[in-house]
Image (cartoon, rainbow, N blue to C red):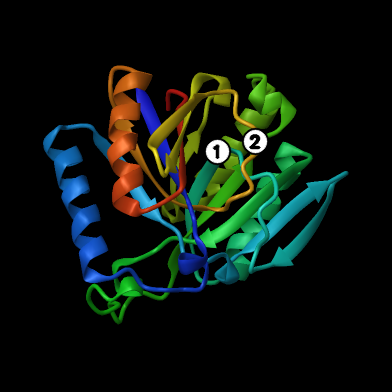
């Protein structure tokens, strides 16, 4: 079973602070252990929301609000990662996705690259960057209502038209199948889903392939401590 562990941002990262060497080493050690255990499937961090935008589609009309973003409904339903030359280009792709989905809220944010945090130099031939288009949960997604086949086909066609600039896509199962991990003064506290809407923007994630929610929670316990976050959510992912 595949699970995603999503951790929430802090004022430190929203201010654009770069992680120090100790944090980078701690995260690297965790990633190394996940790889050695054979469970790591993917993982990314996101840049500050000031570098992104929120796209809200209602009644066929799209409203775009530039970052920095204020946390509202930050319960995730899924995401796409695309490569685009500019934020405006990534927003344009999100608008196309919104036309298919109908009423939806999406955050478009740059994915953190190694050179963004001082690990090496940006290659001279790189003229684009990766963006996450994050879809927010709705009553239907939380109830496990599947998209109609026509919409699923249209989304697949949109992704195919993007060619090799479409890099990844994931859909979360309802939060009732997940678990929230909070870093408290008394240790890590766990709450089974369904979750209330989190007000905290996401900062990054890892995707792991483990036998159970309990095993995913075990990794989440360490993950929360390593990335120094107050809260992380564990969601089961749909089969690709």
Q: Is residue 33 above or below residue 237?
A: below
Residue depicted at x 47% and y 24%: 238
- Mark 2: secondary structure: helix
Query: 115 or 185: nearer the eye?
Result: 185
Query: 134 or 235: nearer the eye?
Result: 235
Label 2 Cα neighbours within 10 Å, binned few <14 / some 14-19 / many ≥20: some
Rendered image: mark on residue 154: 2
**Residue 43 located left or right of residue 179:** left
Rendered image: mark on residue 78: 1
Residue depicted at x 65% and y 25%: 142
Q: Is residue 198 above or below residue 194?
A: below
Q: Where is residue 208 in the image (x, y as percent from the top left)?
A: 31, 33
**Residue 116 located left or right of residue 72:** left
Q: Position of residue 152 (x, y in %)?
A: 62, 29
Q: Where is residue 28 in the image (x, y as percent from the top left)?
A: 20, 54
Residue depicted at x 45% and y 28%: 190
- Mark 1: secondary structure: strand
Query: Where on the picture, by quarter, is residue 74?
Result: top right
Query: Where on the picture, by quarter, is residue 239?
Result: top left
- The residues bearing labels 1 and 2 have C-alpha atoms spaced at a distance of 16 Å
């Amino acid at each position: 079973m595949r699970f995603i562990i999503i951790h929430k941002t802090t004022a430190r990262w929203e201010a654009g602070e770069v992680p120090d060497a100790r944090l980078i080493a701690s995260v690297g050690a965790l990633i190394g252990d996940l790889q050695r255990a054979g469970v790591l499937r993917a993982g990314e961090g996101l840049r500050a929301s000031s570098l992104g935008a929120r796209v809200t589609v209602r009644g066929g009309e799209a409203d775009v609000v530039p970052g920095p973003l204020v946390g509202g409904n930050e319960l995730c339903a899924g995401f796409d990662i695309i490569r685009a030359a500019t934020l405006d280009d990534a927003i344009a792709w999100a608008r196309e996705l919104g036309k298919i989905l109908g009423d939806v809220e999406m955050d478009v944010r740059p994915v953190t690259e190694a050179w963004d945090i001082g690990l090496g130099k940006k290659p001279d031939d790189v003229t684009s960057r990766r963006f996450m288009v994050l879809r927010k949960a709705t009553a239907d997604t939380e109830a496990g209502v599947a998209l109609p086949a026509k919409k699923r086909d249209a989304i697949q066609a949109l992704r195919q038209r993007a060619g090799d600039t479409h890099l990844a896509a994931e859909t979360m199962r309802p939060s009732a199948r997940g678990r929230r991990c909070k870093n408290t003064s008394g240790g890590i506290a766990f709450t089974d889903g369904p979750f209330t809407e989190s007000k905290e923007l996401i900062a990054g994630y890892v995707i792991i392939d483990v036998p159970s929610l309990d095993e995913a929670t075990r990794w989440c316990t360490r993950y929360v401590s390593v990335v120094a976050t107050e809260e992380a959510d564990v969601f089961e992912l749909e089969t690709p």
